[in-house]
Image (spheres, rainbow, N blue to C red):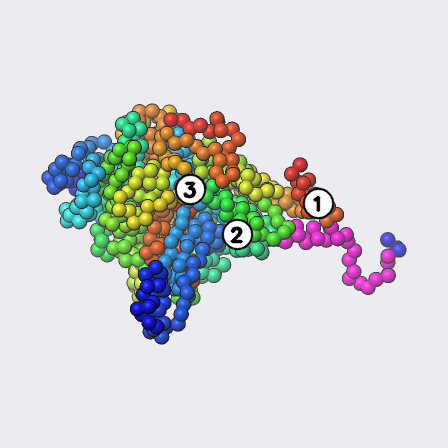
Amino acid sequence: MNKAMGETILESQPDLLIDIDRREQGDLDTEEMLVNMGPQHPSTHGVLRIVLRTDGEMIQEAIPHIGYLHRCAEKIGENLQPYQFIPYTDRMDYLAGMNNNQAYAVAVEKLAGMEVPPRGQAIRVIMAELNRIASHLVSLGCYGMDMGAFTPFLYCFREREMILDLFEAACGARLTYSYLTIGGVFQDLPEGWVEQCREFLDYFEPKIDDYNNLLSFNHIFIKRTGRIGTISPEDVVRWGLTGPLIRASGIRWDLRKVTPYDGYEQYDFEIPIGEPAGSDGFPAAGIEVGDSWNRYFVRVLEMEQSVRIIRQALDRLPEGDFRAKKVTNVKLPDDEVYVEIENPRGQLGFYVRGDGSAIPYRVKSRGPSFCNLSITTHVCRNCLLADIPAIIGSIDVVMGEVDR
Amino acid sequence: MVPEEICLILEKQFGDAVQSTKVEGGHPHAVVAADRWPEVALFLRDDPRLRFNLLNCISSLDLLADNKLACVYDLSSLPLDRGTALIIETHLFAVRVVTDRDEPTIPSVARVWPTAEWHEREAYDLMGIRFENHPDLRRILCPDDWVGHPLRKDYEFPLEYHGIPATTEYELTNPRH
Amino acid sequence: MSWIENRFEEGLILTSLDWAINWGRSNSIWPVTFGLACCAIEMMATGASRFDIDRFGAGAFRPSPRQADLMIVAGTVTYKMASRVKRLYNQMPEPKWVMAMGACTVGGGPYFKHGYHVVKGVDLVVPVDVYVPGCPPRPESLLEGLMRLQDKIRQETRAKSEASRAKAAVV
C-alpha cells in the first residue's frame, strides 16, 4: 500500500495505521470489539459492569463502571445518630455485617472517647471472626462456581448456614445483624451459646481439608487460576489494595497485628501470606506469589487462623458488662477521627467528624473493595477473556461496599 | 515516627506551604496549600524517613460555614520487602487541603498514588471538587447526567430522574441540615 | 365415570388445557440470575443446600433473561440501574413474572428518606406480581413468595386476551 497516500487518511483515524502495519507484516486482519460485561452477569458478583476492549480473545483494556448500587450511605450517615447508622453499615458489605458494624463503632468510640467493657470486646472479636469465616466461605464457594465447580458452593453454604444459626441465636438476624453497636454489643450472648459455638468449631475445622481436596488442590482449578492476574507487591501498595490481596502478594500486613483494636493484641495468631510453588503446604508447580490462586488460598488459611482466635476468645470470655452505659444521644466533640479495621476484604476505614451535636457532621467510609477493584484495568491488560472471571472473583468484590 | 516529627520535617522542607498543623486529638494532620500539594505529596511518598507509600483514603469535606471545601488524605507507610518478620512499625499521618467553595480546584495526586484516581473521581462526583491534571475526571458513582453534587450540605434532592418519580411525598424527604 | 371407561388406551390423562399449562408453568419457574444487593445473598442461600429452591421447580437459575420466566429483583434498585432493570425485563420472553424481594424494591426501604439515588420501589420501573417484604427477607419468605406466585400462575386463564388480563392486573 502506498504509505504516503494512506497517511492523509490515517491522520484522522490512527487506529487504521496499526491495522495497516500488521497487514504489511503478514498478520491477520483483526477487529477490535467492545464487550459489555454486566451489570447483570453471573460472575461479576453483583452489579459491576466492565467494558472490555478485546482483540480476539485478548483483552486490550478493561474499564470497570461502578455506581449501580450507590445507596447514599454517607449522606445518610450525616443525618442520623451513630447508633441509628449502624444498620446501614450492615448493608455496605453485606457479607460481613459484623465487621462493618465494628468499624463504625470503633471509629465513633474513638471520637467520643468511649470505653468498651472487656466482655463486649471479646464478644466483638468472636463475632467478627465468625463473620470472617462466613464471608470467606461465600467467597470460596462463589469463586469455585465461577471456575465451573458447583459442588464446593453447596458445601461452603452448608457450613455458612451453621454460622448464621449462631448469629441468629445471638441477635435474631441472618444477614444484617446490627449486633456490634456503639459501646459494645447490643445484648449478651444467650445461654448455651458458647458450647454451641465450640461444637461448631470442632465440626468446622476438619472441613477446611475437604475444601482443599475439593477445590484448592484440584488440578483443573490450579490450571485455571494459577499464574493468572499476578500483582506485584509494588503495584499492590501503589493501588492501595489491602486484605487478602496484599497478603497474597507476600506482604505480611494485617491491621489486627499492626494497629490492634478491640483487644486483638491479646490473641495469638499468624498472618498467612502467599507463597511460591513448592513451599510447604502449597502445590509443587503452577502457581506464583500474587496470583489468583494465592489470593484464593490466603482466605482458606485465614479461616484456620480465625478458628484459632475464636477458641482463645471463648476460653477467656470475661464476665461483666457487655456494653457501655450510655450509647444513645452521645455528644460527638468538634474533632475528627479516621479509623481502619481489618475487614474480610481488606482495610475498612471510617472518617467521622463531629460538630458538638449527637449527629456526625461528616461520615466517609473507605470500602476495601472500592480500592481493590480499581486495579482491574491495570491487571486485566493482555489477559484472556476467560480469565476475567478468575481475576474479578479472586479480588472478591462486594458491590454494596464499592458503591456504598 | 510520631506526628510531631512528621510535622517538623514538613515545615522545615516546605516552610509556608504548610499552613498549620494539629498534632493532638484523634486525627493529627497538617494543612497544606493547594498549589504546592503535589510537591508535598511526592516528598511524603519518597523521603526515606517518611515513605508514605499507601494512600488509605481521601475524604472530602464541605465546610459550609467557612465557604470552603476540603480534602483529607490519610496516609500510612508499610515496608515492601517480602516479610518473614511481622510488621509492627508503621506510621500514620493525614494531610488536609482546603479550597474555595465557589471554584473548588485541587491538583490531582493520581500520578503519585494511582489509588487516588478513583478516590478523586468520587470526591468530584459527590462533592464537586475539580482535580487538576486528573487522567480521567468523570463521575464515578452517579450517572453521567446527574445534577448536583450530593454530599454538599446545600444539595437539593431530585424530584424525578428520567421519568421515574423520586417520591410521592417530597416534603417528607427534605434532608436535615 | 362409566361413560369414558374402556374407550381409550391406557396411559391417557384427561385434563383441561388451562390446568395443564398452568401446572407446567407453575412448577418450572426459571428465575434469571439477577442479584443486586444484600437480598441476592439470601437468594443464593435459598438456592443452596439447606433451603433448596429446587423443591419447587424454581432452581434453574438462568444467566440470560431470554431463557427465564421470573425476575427476582433482589436488592436496591438505583436510578443508574433502573434502565437496565427495565431492559432486562423487556428481554424476557412472555409469559414473565416479577418478584420484588426486600424492602428496597417494595418501596425504598431504609433508603426512602435520605436515599437520593435509590428508586422508591421497583414497581415504578417494571410491573410486579409478588412483593416479599423483609430486610432482607429470610429464605423461607422468598419460598413463601414463590408459592404465592405459583398460586397466581395457577389461576391464569387463556380465555382472556393478553390485553384484558393486563388491564385486570392494573385494576
Chain of the residue where label 1 is placed in the rendered structure: C
Residue type at mark 1 is: Gln
Q: Counting residues from the N terminus, which is met first, the one under dot 2 or under dot 1?
A: 2
What whole-number distance in Å separates the C-alpha atoms at marks 1 and 3?
44 Å
Residue B143 inside the magenta-drawn segment: no
How many neighbours does mark 2 have within 10 angstroms: few (below 14), some (14-19), or many (20 or more)?
many
Q: Is residue B22 above or below residue A69?
A: above
Residue A6 placement (x, y as % from top left): 34, 67
Query: Mainly helix, strand or loop, the magenta region?
Result: loop
Residue B46 placement (x, y as % from top left): 17, 49
Query: Of helix, strand and loop, which one carries label 1?
Result: loop
How many neighbours does mark 1 have within 10 angstroms: few (below 14), some (14-19), or many (20 or more)?
few
The stretch in magenta equals C4-28
What whole-number distance in Å separates the C-alpha atoms at marks 2 and 3?
29 Å
- Residue A254, numbered label: none
Foreground pick, A395 / B117: B117
- Residue C155, numbered label: 1
Name the image quarter holding the C terminus of chain A. Answer: top left
The single residue placed furthest to the bottom in the displayed view is A26
Query: Of helix, strand and loop, which one carries label 3?
Result: loop
Residue C22 inside the magenta-drawn segment: yes
Q: Is residue B113 left or right of residue A99?
A: left
Chain of the residue where label 2 is placed in the rendered structure: C
The single residue placed furthest to the left in the displayed view is B12
Residue A144 placement (x, y as % from top left): 45, 58
| Mark 2 lies on residue | C33
Q: Is residue A188 left or right of residue C155?
A: left
